[in-house]
Image (cartoon, grey):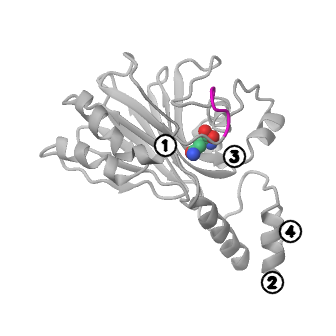
């Protein structure tokens, strides 16, 4: 079992060095939100050479959600923040690759509106809630879901922390999130006198926040849903039983097919 874990670590390390996008969002920032959008958001522009988008919705006052894209799949309809006709009051931003998106559609009868892997996050969340959503994802990810109708914000990170996600939360409920800490430093400075710290969301963790009327948030729960050694809740493409505790080269070959 330990050897299998080491191989998994090695594979995620190798895959994590190649592809990236950048996610960024602020909730409840009343001072200088336009300034933050035009300066801080661009601190991570190197993560997405293909496109960027910033989204404001008057139902979420003092909030802004942004994305720098390195396109992997579905050039046109895979742009983020992603919204679906089926769930018009929600959006998702995600830096990640969800390897089992097709299998999830078959398993649960999801009807996808795009060819983009990130879409499965919105279907899983709406069908089963946030906890089952993160547990069902086979892949690498750092994401933020905003559910405007239910007034909720959720953050999620993959089991081994291959994809990064940082956050800063002030005492007054201002929340900033970003794929890199450097996209939050100016927001941290903006929150003068307020106790706050930029910190990574730990691997294998999801967080749930209430989104209040003025756009600030209140942490409801922070839950570790996976620790190294746990068996995944989804069905892996290569079953544990098919991996050998000794034949590392064979295992790597099987895992990479
Ligand atoms: N680099 C990324 O995080 C890509 C996001 C998503 N999988 C896409 O293909 O667009």
> In the rendered view of the protein, which quadrant contains the C terminus?
bottom right
Label 4 packing within 10 angstroms: few (<14), some (14-19), many (20+): few
Q: Earlier in the sequence, mark 4 or mark 2?
A: 4
- Residue 206 higher or lower than 214, as above or below: below
In contact (CB < 8 Å): disc 4 and disc 2:
no
**Residue under numbered circle 2:** 246
Query: Residue beneath label 1, please?
Result: 48
Sequence-wise first label, 3 or 4: 3
Of marks 1 and 2, the one in the foreground? 1
For the residue pair 116 and 8, the one nearer the viewer reads as: 116
Whole-angstrom CA distance, mark 1 to mark 2, is 40 Å
Residue hosting label 3? 136
Label count reads 4
* Mark 3 → mark 4, Cα distance in angstroms: 20 Å
Instruction: Name the chief secondary structure element in magenta.
Output: loop
Element marked by disc 1: loop
> Which range is magenta?
73-77
User: Which residue is the site of mark 4?
Assistant: 241
Q: Position of residue 178 (x, y in %)?
A: 40, 45
Q: Is residue 24 left or right of residue 118?
A: left
Residue 152 lies, in percent from the top left, at 45, 30
């Amino acid at each position: 079992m330990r050897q299998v874990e080491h191989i998994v670590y090695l594979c995620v390390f190798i895959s994590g060095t190649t592809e990236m996008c950048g996610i960024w969002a602020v909730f409840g920032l009343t001072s200088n939100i336009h300034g933050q959008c035009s300066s801080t958001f661009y601190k991570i522009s190197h993560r997405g050479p293909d496109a960027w988008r910033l989204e404001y919705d008057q139902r979420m006052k003092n909030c802004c959600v942004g994305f720098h894209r390195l396109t992997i799949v579905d050039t046109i309809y895979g742009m983020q923040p992603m919204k679906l006709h089926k769930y018009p009051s929600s959006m998702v931003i995600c830096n990640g690759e969800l390897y089992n998106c097709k299998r999830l559609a078959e398993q649960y009868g999801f009807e996808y509106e795009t060819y983009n892997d990130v879409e499965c996050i919105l279907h899983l969340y709406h069908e089963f809630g946030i906890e089952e959503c993160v547990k069902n994802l086979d892949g690498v990810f750092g994401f933020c879901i905003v559910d405007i109708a239910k007034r909720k914000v959720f953050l999620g990170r993959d089991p081994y922390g291959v994809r990064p996600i940082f956050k800063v939360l002030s005492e007054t409920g201002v929340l900033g999130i970003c794929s890199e800490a450097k996209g939050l430093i100016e927001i941290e400075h903006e929150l003068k006198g307020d106790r706050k710290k930029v910190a990574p969301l730990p691997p294998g963790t999801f967080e749930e926040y209430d989104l209040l009327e003025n756009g600030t948030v209140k942490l409801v729960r922070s839950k570790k849903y996976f620790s190294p050694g746990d068996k995944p809740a989804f069905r892996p493409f290569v079953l544990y039983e098919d991996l050998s505790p000794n034949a590392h080269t064979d295992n790597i070959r099987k895992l990479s097919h």
